[in-house]
Amino acid sequence: MFTTLFADRSSLQRIAVRAAFSLTLAASGAAAMAQVPEGNLDQNLWLELGVFRPKIDSTIRANSPSGAFGTTIDGENDLGLKDNSTVGSLLLGARLGDRWRLEFEYFKLNRRTTRSLTDTIDFGDASYPVSASLASEFNSTVYRLSGGYSLFRTPDSELGVVAGIHYTDFNFILEGAGTIGGVGTASAREERTENVALPTLGLYSTYAFAPNWMLAGRVDVFSLNHDDKKGTLVNAQLNLLYRITRNMALGVGYRLNDYRLSTTQPDWEGEVKYKFRGPQMLLNVGF
């Protein structure tokens, strides 16, 4: 039903993946290099709240029912959707014994705007002419559930493999004066919703390199090639944390999420590409 891990497609993806792999190599040789206070890597339960400020790039296309190619819409340039936003995230984690772990993560990114078009847009069965006032929404909700196993673990470093499900709910709406099936209307509405559940494989690592200081990295990747869907996913992040108490840490980091999906389903023949990347701040509480 699906293929193996894919070859990365951009220099930014290569940087993220190499950074995560470099971190895991550092962790595997770090056990003798740091003596840190008890409590840096011994939490059995943890909660992490994040504030993510990504730069966003999105494109989407929906062909007409007759099979004619629709316009490849640049969400930021063609529709005026914000190319950056502030996003909150929630992560819950638990250890199951000494080496197994479970994690659940959630975040949502919603954008909407209205602008006058400078070019004609064809989307699905609708066509929106130049100068039309077009309202648009592009919303996504992400859930990630994963289980990991630590291949290497000491009091100050950890390296493991992880498998999970990365579920994304996309919703895209256009509404404005235009035509539907060639018939003019003051409110031509087109909407596409796609629920994408991708199994992922990846690596994670944590290295306490000095008293109370930690580096934590993670990368998940997947490639899908099914009958009516093709897609890829890269999810990577690298964070620096400082433990201010035994149970609380503050951190800063960088995050990348990159989706590419093409579909030939009856209700949507087209594609969506969605990338967001940028800095984040973290509050980690563990017990």
Image (cartoon, rainbow, N blue to C red):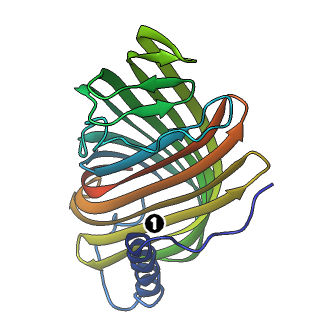
Q: Residue at x 25, y 45 (%)?
A: 83
Residue 6, horizontal then vertical, whole percent: 62, 70
Q: Quadrant of the N terminus?
A: bottom right
Residue 155 in view of the camera = no
Say left or right for 184 vs 75.
right
Q: Residues within 10 Å of mark 1 (few under 14, many from 20)?
A: many
The kind of residue on which mark 1 rests is Arg
Name which quarter of the figure residue 95 lies in: bottom right
Residue with the mark numbered 1:
218
Q: Residue at x 46, y 11 (%)?
A: 184
Name which quarter of the figure residue 117 lies in: top left
Residue 7, horizontal then vertical, whole percent: 58, 74
Name which quarter of the figure residue 118 lies in: top left
Q: Residue at x 65, y 61 (%)?
A: 223
In this rendered view, identify the residue nearer to me: 55 or 24.
55
Residue 45, horizontal then vertical, whole percent: 45, 49
**In this picture, is 172 found above or below 4?**
above
Residue 217, horizontal then vertical, whole percent: 40, 69
Say left or right for 218 vs 194.
left
Residue 272 in view of the camera = yes
**In this picture, is 40 found above or below 229?**
below
In this rendered view, identify the residue nearer to me: 154 or 13.
13
